[in-house]
Amino acid sequence: MDWITILGLFAAFGTTIAFLPQAIKSIKSKKTNDVSLGMYSVYVIGIFLWLSYGILIKNLPIILANAITFILTLIVLVLKLKYK
């Protein structure tokens, strides 16, 4: 594994982990009042597209970061819709 891939993995970890606190808070409290439905809807679509792109170009950092971020943001979006 070259240093560019390692750098990408660290960058992916840093940006992906940022969504973990919101997902945990939303799961525990079942409250998503302060979460923007529009922002999360557009963001989930964007993350899905980045994930698709990563798969097509076979780029591990892009695939890992966006797969995990997609799951975390999708959880929050589903909770937002469920607990309006």
Image (cartoon, helix red, strand yellow):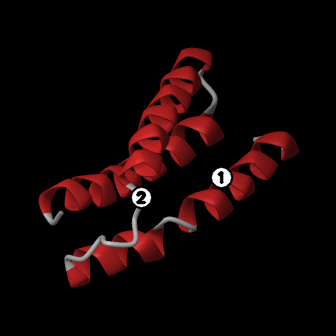
Q: Eyeballing the image, is 69 above or below 60?
A: below
Whole-angstrom CA distance, mark 2 to mark 1, is 23 Å
Q: Secondary structure at mark 1?
A: helix
Q: Mark 2 against mark 1, which lies toward the viewer?
A: 2
Q: Eyeballing the image, is 58 above or below 65?
A: above
Earlier-in-chain disc, 2 versus 1: 1
Q: Amino acid at mark 2?
A: Ser
Residue extending farthest left: 82
Residue for badge 2: 36
Q: In which quadrant is the N terminus drawn?
A: top right
Residue extending farthest top: 56
Q: Amino acid at mark 1?
A: Ala
Taking the spot 86% from the left edge, 46% from the top edge, the residue there is 3
Q: Secondary structure at mark 2?
A: loop
Q: Nearer the viewer, residue 69 or 78?
A: 78
Q: Residues within 10 Å of mark 1 (few under 14, many from 20)?
A: many
Locate residue 42, reporting x and y percent: 46, 38
Whether residue 6 sits left or right of residue 45 in the image: it is right
How many marks the image carries: the answer is 2
- Marks 2 and 1 in Cβ contact (< 8 Å): no
Q: Eyeballing the image, is 68 above or below 66?
A: below
Locate residue 43, reporting x and y percent: 49, 43
Residue 12: image tag: 1
